[in-house]
């Protein structure tokens, strides 16, 4: 039984790694340029902000390279990951707000607790199942979404072409076994600053 569980986790890690490579666009933004509804100018602005934010966070401490994830969409910054103290969380929030071009900051960084392999493995499995569900659903542009799972809570960030797609993404997340909550930060194309060139 334990061997099956470990094999499932390993497959999940491999699959989630593959999905990340496939979703890289020409600019390395994590959102496919062909499907990204943002204008090229907005994508470039977000990419510059992303690089600036990452550099500033890493200049604070190199350990954040592995523990903090950030995403910039239309000038809005989304943060996830784990830190050791509330003070660190506040410092990273401050860095995000001080990044040039920032319109808003959503901070879902958690304070670290003792490592729990079983919980982490379950989170990886949830992420993998959700990513697969998005890829299989033909009404969702899966490459437009970034997913993080922490303690059975799914955090999903991205751009939806329609409100129906947004609802569908949230519905798919809610249907994953063991998910306790879905925190969605999904922007509609119509809410982007510039909708077309």
Image: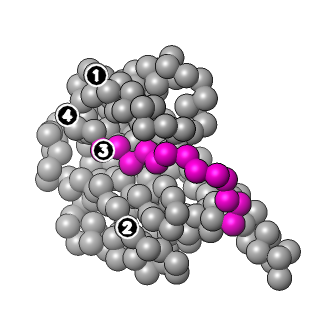
Where residue 58 appears, as percent x and y from the top left, is 52, 23
- The answer to the question of whether label 2 and label 3 lie on touching residues, with beta carbons closer than 8 A, is no
Query: Given this view, does label 1 or label 4 mark the residue nearer the observer?
Result: 1
Is residue 107 a member of the stretch shown in magenta? yes
Dot 1: what SS?
Answer: helix
- Disc 3 to disc 1, how far (Cα)? 14 Å
- The answer to the question of whether label 1 and label 4 lie on touching residues, with beta carbons closer than 8 A, is no
Where residue 93 appears, as percent x and y from the top left, is 34, 33
Mark 1 or 2, nearer chain start: 1
Dot 2: what SS?
Answer: strand
Mark 4 or 2, nearer chain start: 4
The tag on residue 106 is: 3
Where residue 69 appears, as percent x and y from the top left, is 48, 40
**Image quadrant assignment for residue 106:** top left
Q: Which residues are drawn in magenta? A: 106-118
Q: Name the residue: 50% across, 60% down.
A: 149
Disc 2 target residue:
182
- Disc 1 to disc 2, how far (Cα)? 28 Å
Q: Name the residue: 54% across, 38% down.
A: 84
Specify whether residue 30 is in view: no
């Amino acid at each position: 039984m334990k061997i099956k569980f470990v094999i499932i986790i390993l497959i999940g890690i491999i699959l989630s790694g593959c999905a990340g490579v496939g979703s890289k666009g020409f600019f390395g933004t994590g959102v496919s340029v062909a499907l990204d509804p943002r204008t090229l100018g907005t994508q470039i602005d977000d990419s510059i902000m992303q690089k600036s934010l990452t550099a500033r966070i890493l200049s604070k401490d190199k350990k954040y390279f592995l523990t903090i994830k950030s995403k910039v969409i239309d000038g809005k910054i989304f943060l996830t990951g784990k830190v050791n103290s509330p003070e660190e969380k506040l410092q990273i929030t401050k860095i995000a707000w001080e990044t040039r071009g920032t319109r808003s900051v959503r901070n879902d960084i958690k304070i670290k607790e003792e490592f729990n392999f079983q919980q982490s493995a379950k989170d990886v499995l949830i992420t993998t199942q959700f990513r697969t569900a998005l890829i299989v659903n033909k009404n969702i542009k899966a490459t437009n979404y970034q997913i993080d799972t922490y303690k059975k809570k799914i955090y999903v960030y991205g751009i939806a072409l329609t409100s129906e797609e947004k609802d569908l993404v949230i519905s798919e997340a809610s249907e994953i076994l063991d998910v306790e909550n879905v925190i969605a930060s999904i922007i509609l194309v119509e809410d982007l600053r510039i909708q077309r060139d």
